[in-house]
Amino acid sequence: MSQTAHDLTAKPQVEVQAKESPTSVVGEQFVPPVPRISIQAFCETEDTANMLDVASHDRRLARAHVTVQMGGVDAAVAFYGDAPTPNLIIIETVLQGAAIGADLGRLAEVCDSGTKVVVIGHVNDVLLYRELMSSGVSEYLVAPLDSLSVINSIGNLYQDPEADPLGRVIAFVGAKGGVGSSTIAHNTAWSIAEGYSSDVIIADMDLPFGTAALDFNQDPPQGIAEAVLSPERLDDVLLDRLLAKCSNHVSLFAAPSSLEQVYDIDPQAFDPVLAVARKNVPNIVLDVPHIWTGWARSVLMAADDIVVTAVPDLANLRNAKNILDLLKQNRLNDRKPYILLNQVGMPKRPEIAAKDFSDALELDLVATIQFDPQLFGDAANNGQMIQEMATGSKPAETFNHLAALVTGHEQSAVMRKSILGPIFEKLKRKKG
């Protein structure tokens, strides 16, 4: 172990009653992914073991190797008597006070230097927490816990405190081809950039048929294909060369849109590209084509938020439900995908009513966008965004609303409103 294990018994534990909890509430905050490390957990209770098992299947732990077993400190000491210790050990203890430190001292004797230790206890004691921290324990968490809180704690242990926060990845995908998912993605990205003065990278993942370059009136000689096909060369410098600048805050990873090459790529082909992009900008918008390949599935599963675009017909309803069901099964600790209906009200086309569409999916629609071929056609042909063509229009407001949702600004506005509401009410009464 690092200082972690060798100092576990350096100080006596002090048992003092307190109500403050050393753990933090994760809620809807951004939880960083965990790097490629090995994690072994030794639990005392079935509830904690089940919680860690659920956490081990979360997308943020996809690169880590996690094993969970019962037995607590006794099992860990016996196991590491003749085996090397992993990057991180999670130990659950049901002991209290000084007994915790004494028990962990046995673990320190069999741990290698560099191993971190997270302790899950059942005592909500601030002084105990401080003593464990000063003696070298990496983190002390109080049971019962949810999976996301544990993942967040692990992620924080392996984040460079001086590094910039990782960017948020937002994936846009259509329930069917031709539903306008790319248009939604590009316009939402523009709203994020212009509305919040926040840098955005748009990654056009439709390598043979991508339209992002056309939508932004760009013709870059290089783009995302060079990064995907030569990941070993990708760094911050090459990233800047491959990106096309569309505005002060919008950069484009353009697709080659060429049929000269077949793009049968590895399921993890986009991982290095996204890893570099996340370190450079706060927002990455993925324009995912309506195909079902290993890499498309991998990209969707790893995204922080997902927006599904559909039109109101039966095929879209079936496909949307299949997508939502799959995401629900594999993204237990994530927010539900956002789903919107596009091209609503197309003349002479039979449509499923928005409420019926929503009820069938058991998920509220975030927006409906009316069929407006003139506005959207002019914008596409001019290489402009809807906000540039028709600021203040209903579609423009919809994109602003969606931008607020996927970046968390709408939630912040609601919180500010709820906090300031009573103050405003008092001022109104005084004025009255």
Image (cartoon, helix red, strand yellow):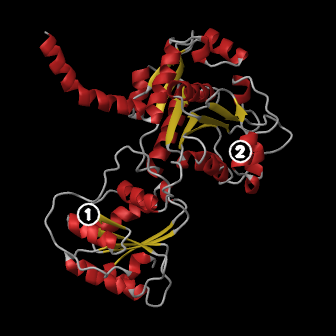
Q: Furthest-right residue in view?
A: 260
| Towards the viewer: 190 or 256 | 190
User: Which residue shows up at 76% across the image and 43% down it?
Assistant: 225
Asked which quadrant contains residue 137, the reply is bottom left
Relative to 329, is 190 above or below? above
> What mark, if any, has residue 239 been given in the picture?
2
Q: Can residue 71 be seen by looking at this rendering?
A: no
Pick whichever, 153 or 159, lies toward us: 159
Image position, residue 29 (x, y; %): 39, 45
Instruction: Look at mark 1 in the image and give the residue it sits on.
Output: 143
Camera sees residue 167: yes
- The percent coordinates of residue 376 (x first, y second) are 63, 15
Q: Position of residue 145 (x, y in %)?
A: 30, 59
Q: From the viewer's perspective, is 133 left or right of 265?
A: left
- Give, as a three-letter code, the residue at label 1: Ala
Nearest to N terminus: mark 1 or mark 2? 1
Q: Amino acid at mark 2?
A: Leu
* Residue neighbourhood size for the residue with mark 1, other residues' Cα within 10 Å, grouped as few (<14), some (14–19), many (≥20): some
Task: Name which residue lies at 40% across and 50% down.
Answer: 333
Provide the secondary structure element on which disc 2 rests: helix
Q: Which mark is nearer the camera, 1 or 2?
A: 2
| Label 1 residue SS | loop
- Which residue lies at the image location 83% right of the left edge and 37% below the top edge? 259
Name the foreground residue: 309 vs 375: 375
Asked if the residues shown at circle 1 and circle 2 are in contact, with their CB atoms under 8 angstroms apart, the answer is no
Mark 2 surroundings: few (<14), some (14-19) or many (≥20) residues within 10 A: many
Locate the N terminus and report the quarter of the image it occupies. bottom left
- Where does the image place residue 70, in percent across and percent down from the top left? 34, 76
Quick one: quadrant of the C terminus?
top left
